[in-house]
Amino acid sequence: MDILERLARIRYKLLIAVGVLLAFLVIFVVAAGLVLWITAPRDKAKVVKNRIGMEFVSLAPGNFIMGSENGKPDEKPVHRVTISRGFLMGRYEVTQGEWKSVMGREHANFKGDNFPVQFITWNDTQEFIARLNQTNDGYSYRLPTEAEWEYACRAGTTADYADELQWLAWYLGNSDQRVHSVGRLHPNAWGLYDMHGNVTEYCQDWYDANYYRDSPATDPPGPSNGQQRVFRGGSFFDPGPVSSLIDGSLRSAARNQAAPDGGILEEHGFRIVAVPR
Protein backbone atom coordinates (compact mmCIF):
# COMPACT_ATOMS: atom_id res chain seq x y z
CA MET A 1 0.00 0.00 0.00
CA ASP A 2 1.55 3.32 -1.03
CA ILE A 3 1.72 6.30 1.24
CA LEU A 4 -0.97 8.25 -0.66
CA GLU A 5 -3.54 5.49 -0.22
CA ARG A 6 -2.65 5.22 3.46
CA LEU A 7 -3.10 8.98 3.93
CA ALA A 8 -6.43 8.84 2.12
CA ARG A 9 -7.71 6.15 4.49
CA ILE A 10 -6.53 8.11 7.53
CA ARG A 11 -8.26 11.20 6.18
CA TYR A 12 -11.46 9.21 5.61
CA LYS A 13 -11.44 7.87 9.19
CA LEU A 14 -10.80 11.36 10.55
CA LEU A 15 -13.76 12.72 8.60
CA ILE A 16 -16.00 9.98 10.02
CA ALA A 17 -14.79 10.70 13.56
CA VAL A 18 -15.38 14.44 13.12
CA GLY A 19 -18.83 13.76 11.69
CA VAL A 20 -19.76 11.56 14.66
CA LEU A 21 -18.49 14.19 17.10
CA LEU A 22 -20.48 16.90 15.34
CA ALA A 23 -23.62 14.74 15.43
CA PHE A 24 -23.22 14.17 19.17
CA LEU A 25 -22.63 17.91 19.65
CA VAL A 26 -25.83 18.78 17.78
CA ILE A 27 -27.82 16.25 19.80
CA PHE A 28 -26.36 17.62 23.04
CA VAL A 29 -27.16 21.23 22.12
CA VAL A 30 -30.73 20.36 21.11
CA ALA A 31 -31.31 18.31 24.28
CA ALA A 32 -29.83 21.04 26.48
CA GLY A 33 -31.99 23.63 24.76
CA LEU A 34 -35.10 21.51 25.31
CA VAL A 35 -34.32 21.06 29.00
CA LEU A 36 -33.72 24.79 29.42
CA TRP A 37 -36.97 25.55 27.60
CA ILE A 38 -38.90 23.11 29.80
CA THR A 39 -37.49 24.39 33.07
CA ALA A 40 -37.24 28.11 32.31
CA PRO A 41 -39.93 30.36 33.80
CA ARG A 42 -41.87 31.86 30.91
CA ASP A 43 -45.22 33.09 32.19
CA LYS A 44 -46.37 36.67 31.87
CA ALA A 45 -49.41 36.23 34.06
CA LYS A 46 -50.92 39.08 36.06
CA VAL A 47 -49.78 38.22 39.59
CA VAL A 48 -51.41 39.56 42.76
CA LYS A 49 -49.86 39.23 46.23
CA ASN A 50 -51.67 39.33 49.55
CA ARG A 51 -50.29 40.67 52.83
CA ILE A 52 -48.28 37.57 53.66
CA GLY A 53 -46.83 37.29 50.16
CA MET A 54 -49.01 34.52 48.73
CA GLU A 55 -49.14 34.88 44.95
CA PHE A 56 -52.31 34.59 42.87
CA VAL A 57 -52.97 34.70 39.13
CA SER A 58 -55.98 36.66 37.89
CA LEU A 59 -58.22 34.47 35.71
CA ALA A 60 -60.93 35.98 33.54
CA PRO A 61 -64.43 34.50 33.11
CA GLY A 62 -64.84 32.06 30.25
CA ASN A 63 -66.10 28.64 29.23
CA PHE A 64 -64.50 25.28 28.59
CA ILE A 65 -65.24 21.63 27.90
CA MET A 66 -65.23 19.71 31.21
CA GLY A 67 -64.60 15.98 31.48
CA SER A 68 -63.02 13.52 29.07
CA GLU A 69 -64.15 10.81 26.70
CA ASN A 70 -60.79 9.09 27.34
CA GLY A 71 -61.19 8.93 31.09
CA LYS A 72 -63.12 7.03 33.73
CA PRO A 73 -66.93 6.85 33.92
CA ASP A 74 -67.10 9.67 36.50
CA GLU A 75 -65.58 12.06 33.91
CA LYS A 76 -68.58 11.67 31.62
CA PRO A 77 -70.60 13.03 29.99
CA VAL A 78 -68.27 15.66 28.56
CA HIS A 79 -70.07 19.00 28.84
CA ARG A 80 -69.56 22.73 28.35
CA VAL A 81 -69.21 24.80 31.53
CA THR A 82 -69.25 28.57 31.90
CA ILE A 83 -67.27 30.29 34.63
CA SER A 84 -69.19 33.56 34.86
CA ARG A 85 -66.97 35.45 37.32
CA GLY A 86 -63.25 36.02 37.32
CA PHE A 87 -61.21 34.87 40.32
CA LEU A 88 -57.67 34.71 41.64
CA MET A 89 -56.11 31.25 41.61
CA GLY A 90 -53.08 30.39 43.72
CA ARG A 91 -50.02 30.61 41.49
CA TYR A 92 -48.47 27.76 43.48
CA GLU A 93 -49.67 25.04 45.81
CA VAL A 94 -49.85 26.32 49.40
CA THR A 95 -46.33 26.08 50.77
CA GLN A 96 -45.06 24.94 54.13
CA GLY A 97 -43.79 28.46 54.75
CA GLU A 98 -47.27 29.89 54.13
CA TRP A 99 -48.79 27.26 56.41
CA LYS A 100 -46.36 28.22 59.16
CA SER A 101 -47.13 31.94 58.68
CA VAL A 102 -50.90 31.47 58.94
CA MET A 103 -51.12 28.62 61.45
CA GLY A 104 -48.22 29.66 63.67
CA ARG A 105 -46.53 26.27 63.49
CA GLU A 106 -44.73 24.03 61.07
CA HIS A 107 -46.77 21.22 59.59
CA ALA A 108 -45.72 17.59 59.92
CA ASN A 109 -42.77 16.44 57.85
CA PHE A 110 -41.47 19.98 57.34
CA LYS A 111 -39.01 20.05 54.41
CA GLY A 112 -38.55 23.76 53.77
CA ASP A 113 -40.57 26.93 53.33
CA ASN A 114 -40.83 26.60 49.56
CA PHE A 115 -42.08 23.01 49.50
CA PRO A 116 -45.84 22.37 49.26
CA VAL A 117 -47.52 21.48 52.52
CA GLN A 118 -48.29 17.74 52.70
CA PHE A 119 -50.21 15.22 54.83
CA ILE A 120 -53.29 17.44 54.65
CA THR A 121 -56.93 16.47 55.11
CA TRP A 122 -59.76 18.46 53.58
CA ASN A 123 -60.69 19.61 57.07
CA ASP A 124 -57.14 20.90 57.58
CA THR A 125 -57.56 23.11 54.51
CA GLN A 126 -60.68 24.62 56.05
CA GLU A 127 -58.86 25.52 59.26
CA PHE A 128 -56.09 27.20 57.27
CA ILE A 129 -58.60 29.12 55.14
CA ALA A 130 -60.63 30.22 58.19
CA ARG A 131 -57.52 31.66 59.83
CA LEU A 132 -56.44 33.35 56.61
CA ASN A 133 -59.89 34.93 56.27
CA GLN A 134 -59.56 36.32 59.80
CA THR A 135 -56.78 38.60 58.58
CA ASN A 136 -59.45 40.71 56.81
CA ASP A 137 -57.02 41.72 54.08
CA GLY A 138 -59.69 42.49 51.48
CA TYR A 139 -60.03 38.99 50.06
CA SER A 140 -62.26 36.01 50.76
CA TYR A 141 -60.33 32.76 50.54
CA ARG A 142 -61.59 29.26 49.76
CA LEU A 143 -60.74 26.12 47.85
CA PRO A 144 -61.52 26.19 44.13
CA THR A 145 -64.63 24.44 42.96
CA GLU A 146 -63.95 21.38 40.86
CA ALA A 147 -65.04 23.29 37.75
CA GLU A 148 -62.78 26.25 38.57
CA TRP A 149 -59.86 23.89 39.12
CA GLU A 150 -60.26 22.15 35.75
CA TYR A 151 -60.84 25.49 34.00
CA ALA A 152 -57.59 26.82 35.49
CA CYS A 153 -55.67 23.61 34.76
CA ARG A 154 -56.76 23.40 31.13
CA ALA A 155 -55.86 27.06 30.50
CA GLY A 156 -57.76 27.13 27.23
CA THR A 157 -56.76 23.66 26.03
CA THR A 158 -58.92 20.62 25.25
CA ALA A 159 -56.34 17.79 25.32
CA ASP A 160 -55.99 15.27 28.14
CA TYR A 161 -52.96 17.19 29.41
CA ALA A 162 -53.02 20.99 29.39
CA ASP A 163 -49.30 21.05 28.78
CA GLU A 164 -47.63 17.85 27.63
CA LEU A 165 -44.16 19.21 28.38
CA GLN A 166 -45.16 20.32 31.88
CA TRP A 167 -46.51 16.83 32.56
CA LEU A 168 -43.45 15.11 31.09
CA ALA A 169 -41.09 17.51 32.83
CA TRP A 170 -41.77 15.92 36.21
CA TYR A 171 -40.22 12.75 34.90
CA LEU A 172 -37.59 14.24 32.59
CA GLY A 173 -36.59 16.32 35.63
CA ASN A 174 -36.49 13.16 37.77
CA SER A 175 -39.36 13.52 40.24
CA ASP A 176 -38.12 10.19 41.64
CA GLN A 177 -41.42 9.81 43.50
CA ARG A 178 -40.64 12.66 45.87
CA VAL A 179 -42.07 16.12 46.35
CA HIS A 180 -40.26 19.13 44.88
CA SER A 181 -40.26 22.81 45.76
CA VAL A 182 -43.07 24.76 44.07
CA GLY A 183 -42.53 26.58 40.80
CA ARG A 184 -39.52 24.53 39.84
CA LEU A 185 -40.76 23.85 36.30
CA HIS A 186 -42.47 26.08 33.77
CA PRO A 187 -46.15 26.98 34.28
CA ASN A 188 -49.18 26.36 32.11
CA ALA A 189 -50.39 28.94 29.60
CA TRP A 190 -52.11 30.97 32.34
CA GLY A 191 -49.10 31.11 34.63
CA LEU A 192 -50.07 28.40 37.12
CA TYR A 193 -47.38 26.01 38.34
CA ASP A 194 -47.59 22.29 39.15
CA MET A 195 -51.18 21.74 38.04
CA HIS A 196 -49.98 18.31 36.86
CA GLY A 197 -48.00 16.56 39.60
CA ASN A 198 -46.11 17.52 42.77
CA VAL A 199 -48.93 17.25 45.35
CA THR A 200 -52.55 16.49 44.59
CA GLU A 201 -54.97 19.34 45.35
CA TYR A 202 -58.29 19.39 47.20
CA CYS A 203 -61.33 21.11 45.74
CA GLN A 204 -64.35 22.54 47.56
CA ASP A 205 -66.83 20.01 46.14
CA TRP A 206 -68.33 16.90 47.57
CA TYR A 207 -67.66 13.95 45.28
CA ASP A 208 -70.45 12.34 43.28
CA ALA A 209 -69.53 9.94 40.48
CA ASN A 210 -72.70 10.87 38.59
CA TYR A 211 -72.68 14.63 39.17
CA TYR A 212 -71.84 15.51 35.55
CA ARG A 213 -75.12 14.04 34.35
CA ASP A 214 -77.16 16.97 35.66
CA SER A 215 -74.69 19.57 36.93
CA PRO A 216 -75.44 23.24 36.15
CA ALA A 217 -73.93 24.62 32.97
CA THR A 218 -72.84 27.81 34.74
CA ASP A 219 -70.62 27.91 37.85
CA PRO A 220 -71.41 24.36 39.07
CA PRO A 221 -70.96 24.35 42.87
CA GLY A 222 -70.75 20.58 43.27
CA PRO A 223 -73.22 18.30 45.08
CA SER A 224 -74.98 19.65 48.18
CA ASN A 225 -73.80 16.73 50.29
CA GLY A 226 -71.70 13.60 50.22
CA GLN A 227 -69.18 11.50 52.10
CA GLN A 228 -65.95 12.35 50.28
CA ARG A 229 -64.31 15.48 48.89
CA VAL A 230 -62.75 15.85 45.45
CA PHE A 231 -59.03 16.22 44.87
CA ARG A 232 -57.35 16.88 41.52
CA GLY A 233 -54.10 17.04 39.60
CA GLY A 234 -52.22 13.86 40.48
CA SER A 235 -48.99 13.83 42.45
CA PHE A 236 -45.36 12.78 42.49
CA PHE A 237 -46.52 9.27 43.45
CA ASP A 238 -48.37 8.80 40.17
CA PRO A 239 -46.65 6.76 37.44
CA GLY A 240 -44.32 8.16 34.81
CA PRO A 241 -45.17 9.11 31.22
CA VAL A 242 -45.84 5.69 29.70
CA SER A 243 -47.80 4.26 32.63
CA SER A 244 -49.63 7.56 33.15
CA LEU A 245 -51.16 7.27 29.71
CA ILE A 246 -52.95 4.20 31.07
CA ASP A 247 -53.51 5.23 34.69
CA GLY A 248 -54.33 8.83 33.80
CA SER A 249 -54.27 10.35 37.29
CA LEU A 250 -52.32 13.37 36.03
CA ARG A 251 -54.82 14.28 33.31
CA SER A 252 -56.69 17.61 33.46
CA ALA A 253 -60.07 15.85 33.80
CA ALA A 254 -59.06 13.08 36.23
CA ARG A 255 -61.13 13.00 39.45
CA ASN A 256 -60.24 11.46 42.79
CA GLN A 257 -61.78 11.58 46.24
CA ALA A 258 -61.03 11.19 49.94
CA ALA A 259 -62.91 11.44 53.25
CA PRO A 260 -62.69 15.03 54.56
CA ASP A 261 -61.31 13.93 57.93
CA GLY A 262 -59.16 10.99 56.91
CA GLY A 263 -57.02 9.42 54.25
CA ILE A 264 -53.98 11.49 55.18
CA LEU A 265 -51.32 10.73 52.59
CA GLU A 266 -47.96 12.25 51.80
CA GLU A 267 -49.14 13.53 48.43
CA HIS A 268 -52.21 15.41 49.74
CA GLY A 269 -51.90 19.20 49.53
CA PHE A 270 -53.97 22.12 48.28
CA ARG A 271 -54.16 25.39 46.36
CA ILE A 272 -56.56 28.20 47.17
CA VAL A 273 -58.70 30.82 45.45
CA ALA A 274 -59.03 34.48 46.46
CA VAL A 275 -62.01 36.70 45.62
CA PRO A 276 -61.96 40.46 46.37
CA ARG A 277 -64.52 41.35 49.01
Image (cartoon, rainbow, N blue to C red):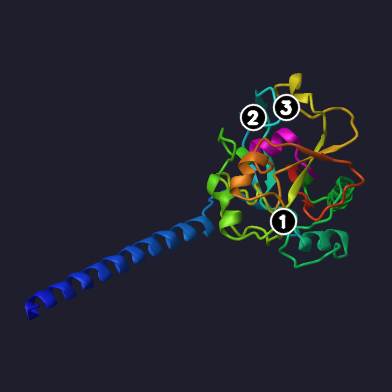
Query: What residue is shown at x 71% (from left), y 33% (from top)?
Result: 147
Mark earlier in primary sequence (1, 2): 1
Image coordinates for residue 33, horizontal then vertical, percent = 43, 60
Per the model, the C-alpha gap separating discs 1 and 3 is 36 Å
- Within 10 Å of disc 2 (Cα), the crowding (few <14, some 14-19, many 20+) is many
Quick one: SS at disc 1?
loop
Q: Which residues are magenta?
A: 141-152
Label 1: which residue?
54
> Looking at the picture, which amino acid does disc 3 mark?
Pro
Quick one: SS at disc 3?
helix
Per the model, the C-alpha gap separating discs 2 and 3 is 9 Å
User: Which residue is at the front of the view, 117 or 148?
Assistant: 117
For the question of whether residue 248 can be seen, the reply is no
Is residue 148 a member of the stretch shown in magenta?
yes
For the question of whether residue 239 can be seen, the reply is yes
Label 2: which residue?
68
**Closer to the camera: disc 2 or disc 3?**
3
Mark earlier in primary sequence (1, 3): 1
